[in-house]
Structure formats: C-alpha cells, structure tokens
Image (spheres, rainbow, N blue to C red):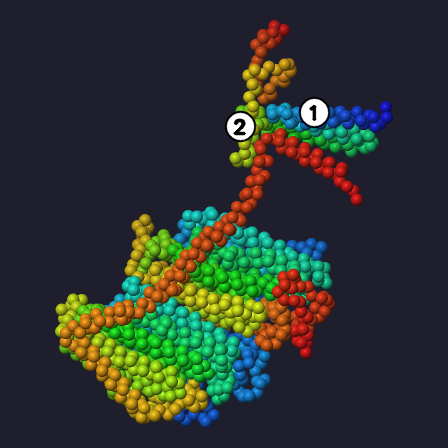
Amino acid sequence: MTPGIPTLLILIPALPLTATIVTAVFGRSALKQNSHRPVVLALLGSFVASLMMLAQVRQESEAKPSQMVGWETSVDLWNWAEVPNALNTPPAAHSASVQGIEHGLPAALPFRIDLTLRADALTSIMLAMVTFISLLVAIYASGYMHGDRGYWRFFSYIGLFVFSMTMLVSASNFVLLYVFWEAVGLCSYLLIGFWYEKPEAAAAGKKAFLVNRIGDFGFALALFLMWTTYGTLNFHDAHGIAGILGQTRLADPELYVGGGVATAICLLLMLGACGKSAQFPLHIWLPDAMEGPTPVSALIHAATMVTAGVYMVTRCTPLFMVSPDAQHVVALVGFVTAAIGGVIAMTQTDLKRVLAYSTISQLGYMFLGLGVATLGGITSGMFHLFTHAFFKALLFLGAGSVMHAMGGVVDMRRFGGLRRLMPTTHWTFLFGCLALAGVIPFAGFWSKDAIIAAVQERAHDEPEFLYLYWGALVVAFLTSVYTFRAFFMTFYGSERVPYEAGPNAHESPTSMTVPLTILAACALVVGAYFERTEGFAEFIKLTPSLAYEVVNSKNVEIVSQSHTLVGAISTLVALTGMGLAAFLYLGDESQVALLTRLLMPLYLLSHGKLFFDQIYNVLFVWPLWTLAQASYWIDRVLIDGLVDLVGRIPPKLAALLRPLQTGMVQFYALAMVWGVVILIFTLLTWPTH
Amino acid sequence: MDESALLENYLIVGALLFGTGLVGFFSRRNMIVMFLSAEMMLQGVSVNLVAWGRYHNDWGGQMLVIFILTVAACEAAIALAVVLTLFHKSGSLDIAIWQRMREENQPAYVDRDVSPDYQPDHQWPKLTPSGIEPKPDLEEITHRAHV
Amino acid sequence: MPTLLLLTIFTPTLGALLVWAFARNDHAAVRQSALVTAITTLGMIAVLLGDFAATDQPYATLSYPWLGDSSGIDIRFSIGLDGLSLWLFGLSALLLLTSVLVSWEAIIDRPATFYSLLLLLGSGMLGVFAARDIILFYIFFEFTLIPLFFLIGVWGSEDRRYAAAKFFLYTLAGSVLTFLGLLAIVLWDYNHNESEIMTFSIPALTAGLAQHPIASPYQLWIFLALFAGFAIKVPLFPLHTWLPLAHVQAPTAGSVILAGILLKIGTYGFARFSIPMLPEATATCVPWLLGLSVAGIIYGALVALAQSDMKRLIAYSSVSHLGYCMLGLFALTSLSVEGSVLQMINHGLSTGGLFAAVGMVYERYHTREIRQLGGLARRTPRLAFFFVLFALSSIALPGLNGFAGEFLILSGMFQRAWTAAPQALVLAYQVMTVLAVFGVALGAWYMLYLVQRVFFGPLKEADHSHSDPPIRDLSFHEVAALSPLVVFIVWIGIQPEFFLGRMRATLGPVADNAVEALDERQGRHERALVGPPSWSDTSGAAGLPSSANRIGGQATRGTRHFSPVDSLVSPPQLPLGELTRVE
C-alpha cells in the first residue's frame, strides 16, 4: 500500500531530521567514519518518498475538481501561536468560505500560525529535485570527506540542511517559510565555516549570515506588511480566512491589493530573495562561501539553497502580478546580476570561484525569467532552476574531484592538462560545461533558451525588454567563454600537477565518480526530455500560484517560430564563445596576455570583482563600525559621565556644611545657644494673626 | 516682702548662676572646669525651678529639682569618667586637643602665642590646674611636719 | 497549592539558613545542600506550573493580615500567581539552579556565605513575582538588591567595589521614587473608594483605579515616579550605564541572575503597575517610551559591536534586547504584549546561558578579552556548541525561542505603526519600526563577531600557565547547568503557544485600559478608519470591569481632567467612542 500524500509530506523532512539527530548523538562516539550511513539512508528514503509524492500530486493535479484553481493540499502539524483578536480586520482581508459577502469576517482577526505543510506541483518538484541532488552529494561526500575529523559533524549538518530545505519548500505559511529560510541560512553558515580553524572560512560564514540577515530584514518587513494588509500569513485558506495565495483570492484576483502597498511588499520580498539567492546588490557572500567543503558548495550554494529565492518569488507570483513595477525590478535585478556574474567570472583564476560567479549569473537568469512575469517566463525561470541544479551540482562536484586529486589546490594556474589523469571527471565536467554554456541538446540550452525567448515575447508588449533580450544574449556569450576557459585551463594544455597533490595524483574513488556520472547523464537528458514532452511547464502550471487566470491570460502561446530563432541565435552565441575560449586558451597563451594588456581597465575591474566588497566596506561597514566606536565613547564619557556627575552632587552639597564641624566644643555650644536665642526671638516676635 | 519680689531675687540668683556657668563653659578649655561650669548652669536652672515652684505653691518644681540632682550626680560620674578617658588618651585636659575630630581639610584653631613683651598688669588669683598633680610644696610639707 | 507556593518561595531561605548553620565549614556539603535546595524549589515550581490552568483568575492565592491597624491600613501577606508572573517565577528557579551549578568550582572563597546569599537572592526573586501586595512586592523588590550587592562586592572581579556601589545606589535611587509613586496610588485609592480600608492589594488597586482613575496630571507624575525605578532596573536607554559595569564585575552566578531575572523585574513592574493602573499617563508617554526603546535597541547593538570584553558585549546586548521587551510592552497591541512577556523569558534563557558560558571560558583562561582567545571550538567543542546555540537564540534565529518573542513584538509594533499610529507620529512610528527590525540584523553582527573571534579561527589560548590543570571541555555539572536552558530554548522556539496560551488570559486585561486611553487620545475619526486592536471584545466577560461599568463610573466623575501635556498634544474630546460602544 502506498502511503498517502500527508504521510509522505511529513516523512520527507522527518527522515533527514532523524538522521541528523542520530548522527549528532552517536556520531562522535559510535558511528565515526560510518556517520554517512544514516544520512544517506534517510536521504534515499526521502527521495523515494518525494518520487511517490510527485506521482500522486501529478495524478491529483490533473484530476482536480473544476472549482479549484490548481490543486493543493495541506497538513496541519501543530499550532505555533494563536493570538485572538490581534488585528482589526483590514479591508483586504477576506473570508474564505463566503465569497462576496462583506460581513463574512469578525471585527478582529486572530494571529494564527500553524505548522502547516502543503503539497502541490511546485512543492513536489522542488522536493524531488532537492532530495535527489542531496542524495547524490551525500554519497559523493562520503568519499570526499573521508578521513576528516569532523566527518560525523558534516553529515549531521547535511541532514539538518536537507530537513530545513524540504520544510522550506513545503511550508504553507510565510512565518514557516521565514523560519526555514533562516534555518537553511544557519546550515549554510555552519557548513561554510565547517573548517572553522581557517580564519577565512569562519569569516566567510559570518559574512554569508550577515548579508542574508540584510535580506531577511526586508523579508521580515514584507511579512509584517502582508499581515497588516491581508490579515493572515497563510498561503492557503484556513480557518475561514482567505490565505494570501489561497483558492479564494486566486479565484478572484480582484482581492489582491494593488498600488504602492503591493509594490512595497514585492520589493521587500525581493530584498529577501536577493539575500538568499545572491542577487545584486547582496551577491557578495556567495563567492566567499566557497571556503566551505566542495560538496557543500555543490549542494547548498549551487543547487538548492540559493534557489530558495527563486522558489519564493515563484510562489508569490500573484503578489508580483499586481505590481508591474516590482516585475521590472525583478527582471532588472536578474539581468544586472547575470551580467555582473558573467563579467567577474571571466578573469577569476580560482576554479570554484568561477563556478560561484557563474551560479550568481545563472540565478540572475532565473530572476530575469521571473521578472518577465508571463507564464512562459515564470515556468522557464523554474525550469532553469531545475536544470541548473543538475549541471551546476555536477560542475561543483567535478571541481571537487579535481581538488581532491590536486591536494586541495583550486588555482587553475597551478594545474592543467588533467584529462588523461582524470578521465571520468574530464568527461563529466565537459557535460556540465556544455550544459552551462547552453549547447544543444544539453539541459542548460533548453531552459536558458526558454528564458531568452520569454524575454523576447515580453518585448512585444514592452519594447524595454528588448534591451534585456540583447543583454541576455551577451551574457550567454560570456557564459560560454568563461565556462570553457575554466574547462580548457583545467583539463587541456600541458599536464601540470601542483606539489600538494603528491607523486600519484589519481582519479577519485567510485563513491565520487558514480554521482558524477549520474549527474552528467541528467545534464544531458533532463532538459531535452522535459522540453520535448512539455512536461515541466505543463506540470508547474498546475501550481495554484501559477494556475490562476491573470498569469494565464498574459500567457501568449509560445510561438514556435521565434523560439526556434532564439534557439538558433543562442546556440550560435554559445559556439562562438566556445570557439573564442578555445582560441585563447588552447595552445600558447600569448593572445590572452595581449588581450589582457589591451583591455587592462576592464581586466582590473573584473579581476577585482568590480570592487563590491571594498565599496560596501567604505559605504556601510566602516561607517557603522565608526558609529559603534563613537557610541561607545558617548556611552563612557557622556552618559556614564553624566551619571557620575549626578553622583558627585551630594558630596559637593555636603562639603558646604563641612566647615561647621570644627571640632571645637565651645563652638558647638555657642551655636546651640544662638539657635535657642533665635528660636525664642522668633517665637516672641512671631506675628500672631 | 511680697511673693514676687522674693521670686525676683531667686530668679536673679538663678540667672547669675546660669550666666556664670555659660561664660565659664565658653571661655575655659579645661575639661573639668567646663564640666563644673555646666553643672553651674544646671544649678541655675534648678534654682529657677524651685523659685517658680514656691511662687505657684506647687511642689512639682521642688520634685523636679530633686530628680535633677539625682540625674546630675549620675551625669557627673559619667562625665568625669569620659574626661578621665580623654585625659588618658591625650595626656592633657585641654579640650582643644580634641578638635582633631573636626571634618577633614578644615583649618585648625591655632593658639596665638602671647607676645614675649606682654606684661599682665595684674596678677589674678589662679586655680590649681586640675588633673595635674600639684607640685608638692616642700616648705609646706616641712612646715606641717613641725606642727 | 497556596501552601506549596508559600513553601516554594521560602525554600531557598530555608536552604540558606541550613547551609549557613550546619555546613559552613565543609565546601562539598555547602554546594550539595545548595544544589538540593535549588532542585527542590524547581521541583515544587514544576508541580505548581503543571497545575496552572489558563484562566485569568489568579492561581494559588494566599492572603492574611500582616501589618495594619484599626485605622484601616490593610497591608497583607498576599501571594499568588497569574499568567504574567507564572513563567518569570519558573525562570527564577531555573536560573537559580543554573547559577548554583556554575559556581560549583568557581567559588572557593567563603562558599557558605556565597551560597547562602545566592539562595536568599532566589527567595527574593520568587517573592517579587508572587507578591500580590504592594508593600510585600516592594520589600522583595528591594531585598533582591542586598544579596546581589554582596555577591558583586565580595566575589566580583578587580573593580568590584565601585561596581557594587554604583549598581546599588543607582537602582536604589530610582526605586525610592517608585515607592513614593506606589504610595501615591494607594492613597488616591483610599481617598476615592467607598470603604474605609486603605488597601495595598495589587488586584484590588487595579480594579479600584479602573473605577476611579487618577486625575491626569497626577497620573503623569506618578507614572514618572514609577518609571524612575523600573526604567533603571530594565535598564532603558539612557539609564543603563550601571549594567555593563555590574555585569563585568559580577561573578558568573551574579551575572546570570542579574541578566536573567533582575532586569525583568523592571519590565514586570511596568506591566504590573504602570500600564494597568495608569492608563492615561501610559498613553501620553507611549511615543517617548517607544522612542527610547528603539534608541536602546540600536544603541545597545552598536555599543556591543565596539566591545573587546565578552561580558561587556553581552551586557550591552541585554540593553538592546530589553529594548525589544519595552517596545513590545508599549506598542500596546495584543501581539506585542504577549511577545514582550515571552521575550522576557527568552532573554533570561539565552543571555543567562551566554553569561554562564562566558563564565566557563573565564574559569579556564582567566580572561574575558576577546582578542586573547580564538578557536576554542577545537579545545572545548561542547562549550562551543552551547555557546553558539545561546548566541543563535539571542540573535533570534527562527526555530529557537528568541524568534518567537521578537517576531510577535515586531509584528505588533508594525501593526501599531501602520494601522493605529496617531496621525502626527505615523512617520516617526514607521521609522522606529524599521529601525527595530534592523536591530535584529545588527544583533547578528556583534554576536557572530563574538562567536567567530572566540570559538572559530586558529586556536589561540590566553596564557593559563598559572592554572595547573590542563584545559578541559565541559564537566558533567557544567553540562547539567546549561542543558535545562537548552531544553526551554528549543521548546519555546517550536511551540510558543504552550507558553503564550497560559499567559494570554491575564495579559489581555493588563493593557486593556491603556489601549482604550490611547484610543481616546488618537481621536475617534482615526479609529473609524483603522482602529487599534482591543481585547475588550472577548475579555469583557472574563472578570474585567465591563464597558458599561466604565461609562457609569465616568458619568459620576463628571468632566474628565486633562493634563496640560495632554491638551497640548490633542484637544480634549468628548468620549464619543464610549457612547458608540453602548449601542
């Protein structure tokens, strides 16, 4: 008997959590180098469960009752907080059951937050993707991390991460989303700083957390604004109140508040997404996050966690739909980020950093797709998220494999020509590069193409998007160049091995190459399969947030002719990029030197990562730091000084009377007599009446 | 002699006693003399009380004086004990020594030296300094021995 | 149960006497009996808390005449618990246990005196939260100062005398004024109630003042008098400078108790006296108090960022976090008040834990300087685990307790600023809210800075050559000291409703009058558009004086008094709101 959706929904996060607890408790003493076993088992279980859920959700979604706007279901676990009569019912709050009746709600709404998990198309596909990638990464890490002192610690963090990530994508209210939004941030912090003795790792972890906190600041404000605007924070309709993304509102899009409030909510949400998904201007933490172990970079900083922002914006599509300004901001941010990532990646020499900037760039593509805000754009953004997870995880794991063999060296200038030494890694890495560059028929081609095509579609209505379209093509060219630059520098040219690698650098063990092979196969087929069957877009479309009429009405059927044209152009661009990379980096590198000298200012900018860190230091970090020091000075000198000053008043007053204490008895007696005399005199002369 | 004139006489005596005591207390630095002066003030007040009691035909005044005498006896004992202790501590009966009990950083009263060319025009009779063992007058002793 | 409550309060006193009388010369016996006392107290409280029902009725009350005479002065020994004091009462006992355990090896100088004072302090804290009579409250309130004065002054660090004196005088100076204010409340009630009894009972006064509120100008002065003591205790910016000093100099146990409980007495005082008894003055002062709270949040965080001493950093973080408590209390929405009381507990757990953990670092390395330490996660992984957990709780990581409190406070404050702010101050309130939310991000900065410097990075140990034993990880009793805190940190984080539900029935009435006064000040037309929340809809039946009563009371009082301040800000208005409510 197959378990039902509610059971599966609970099982998927519960398994990794159990594994985490088991590993954390027994890891150090009992499991030791077997610590990966509970986690890998749990992830396998979760993956199987997600596949089962995917199948059931698909079945249910396609057979959904006609009055539903996209199929969804939710499971309540327990009540997190319920404050009755917390908010006077705002105008935009709406009763879930009785539509169109003004008095369906009480005068004040409760602040009710439940631990509610949901299942719908978007959630189930995210769950499947997350558990699949994390399973492969966990297997890979059991080889990669073998022998590390913190082996058990690593796997308990990984389990915790998968728990948080699965909860994040299945949360059914904004508070829960926020909770696990920060929880994955915590896992990221812990895993970046996994080798905490390295000062860079500890600093990078802190930086990631803090930059994310800036984003979460916006996210939190968005939550509060939604609470005061809509009177609920639930996605779904619950307890008689229409959820923000619930059936009632989706059936009647008039119920969404537009105007400035909508734009504010969306921009604040976008700030949150910028933090988590490393978008401009909060992208600066991701390259530093590469200090973490490579499987972590693959899992968290390429495939899953960084896409949470994309997931969130997709989930909130109805909110973005009422604010065209916000859509433009999303598109623009996405494009700018894609460009920045592409430009910086051109000149980096650290293999993992090239991949990190390419991740930033690809995430930018996804946001560009979401910003297009047509059904085509959003589904293609999600599609890119999906395919990107496979090939970027593949690339990172490949880079990890190289690092493993090279004794931890990631500087591409110090090794080269590794294709004979590491044949499996070479082939799989090539597949990843082809997918990333968007060469037909690899996965990246289909999804990136869909985004570019969607941008072009939107340009029919709004000519401004034409600039983004050309820009996106240029970035695609950059992508192709830097990808193959890294590939050629690593695997071609004369064979060079750094001394850290030791005398017999060799191909990685099976536990590492098997995941690589599986991912490479995915990078090859996953795009084409879903594209050919139209499966991905059709399925994602069934999500309630995407199934309502506003999105669908904007959906111009993708004209196959223009799509083909776009596909042809982008393939051409990718191949040109590849050619340029081959011309520059195969053979002698005199052209590179010449080009560098010709474009020296550009090169310096790119090499210096556009100096974002420095600019932020000058603009924010130092002023705050100075302000902190100044405040401390004020505290010590002014405020505490004032307190001490007040403390000195009584002694000063008392000092005025001190001369009276002469120590001469006669003086005291005289004073007493004078006192009596004055008293008597006063008594006698006191005017009566 | 009528009652009020009689009262007046007593009151004058009382006031004189009190005033003498007051002046003595203020002007002398010898603790024992100061104590005696204080006692004198007390007696002045007592005379007052007795006089008024007689005037009002009320024994209350007399009674109170009897009490005062008793209490004064106790007080005298305590006061002398205190004076003795102070003497033991400082070796002197000068009350001014104890001005070191004043507040910190306050100027002390300094006795001005009598200028060397000061000649008292008149030698007043002097009490034996109390508390200091009088120097035995050999002549006296020898004279007495012959008595 | 009342007897059990009485026993609970005085068990630590009894323990202190026993320690002092019978075990004075035996270090092991001293600390064991102190531990047994603390565990017994905690056990009894567990029974009390387990029995508590979530109603607005006071629980386990006990009251008998104490001081008083035929002239009608009625000072009673009156104790009991309600939703407001319940968890603070429990937290006191929990932190008492923690502080006994953290002193286990740290205190070798005159242990009997130390533990006696610590246990006496425990009785004082429990008494403050259980007292239902003003005089009894005040006695316990002041009594907490004395043992702590000696704990800091005798067992503190190098500058302990100055710190103890400053702490004592500063807080005492404020609380003397508080006492005057409390007496003024009693006298007003005496002059205006029908009976001839001068009651000192807190619930009776609260109910009485709802019937015949204090005239506005007096209310403001009395509010300021109470404010003097409570705000210094909290401590509200800019009255906080005694706190870092006292924390830095105090022994670990003193810091734990000071941060965990004694600061909460200030916020508790506001919630117990100022807000329910002086609603109009509260309404007048709300903008100022919110401003000060937010200033404290940002300022505390900034100053914490500039610290090089671990304890001082955490002390300034307390200033910041207590700012959230005050913000929630004076935002006067149901969300924020509940969040605020929860945050009092949260801060006690997380900052108490942080101080305990810093104490453990200090015991090993005899330094509190951040720059002398580094990479301790390698040497003491368990300590690092606990420290990071407490730090995360302190920076409001979702899933741990700090988040639950701060989220409720901030959403309540947001609600106040966006839907129910007075017209002239809307922008100011909104800026305050945004700053307060930003304070959460700043909080992460200094806390992670501390964690990164001390526990991560390459191993750097301060010179500890003079301590003979090698550096060990946490011992059993140290783990035992910290673990209970962790249990509650996680529990509150994942199910705050368990704790909120038990305090809710009491908290509604606390702010009800003040909300109404605020409502009135802000004018009726504003309310018609977007009104502030009111609990009266549901809680009217639950023992509150009903609206009808209030209107009756007002009619007999005739014209309302408005303070000069009041009339400057908004002209006197007819109480139309209440007229409409009659319909």
Residue B84 left/right relative to A207 = right
Please count the marks in the image.
2
Check whether the beta carbons of the residues at disc 2 and disc 1 lie within 8 A of each other: no
> Which quadrant: the N terminus of chain A?
bottom left
Where's residue C231, x and y in %? 54, 58
Q: Residues within 10 Å of mark 2 (few under 14, many from 20)?
A: few
- Per the rendering, the mark at residue B20 is 1
Where's residue C102, x and y in %? 41, 57
Residue A143 left/right relative to A280 = left
For disc 1, the chain is: B
> Which quadrant: the C terminus of chain A?
top right
Q: Which residue is mark 2?
A: B89
Confirm whether residue C204 shows in the render: no
For disc 2, the chain is: B
Q: Amino acid at mark 1?
A: Thr
Residue B74 left/right relative to A472 = right
Residue C170 left/right relative to A129 = right
* Quarter location, residue B60: top right
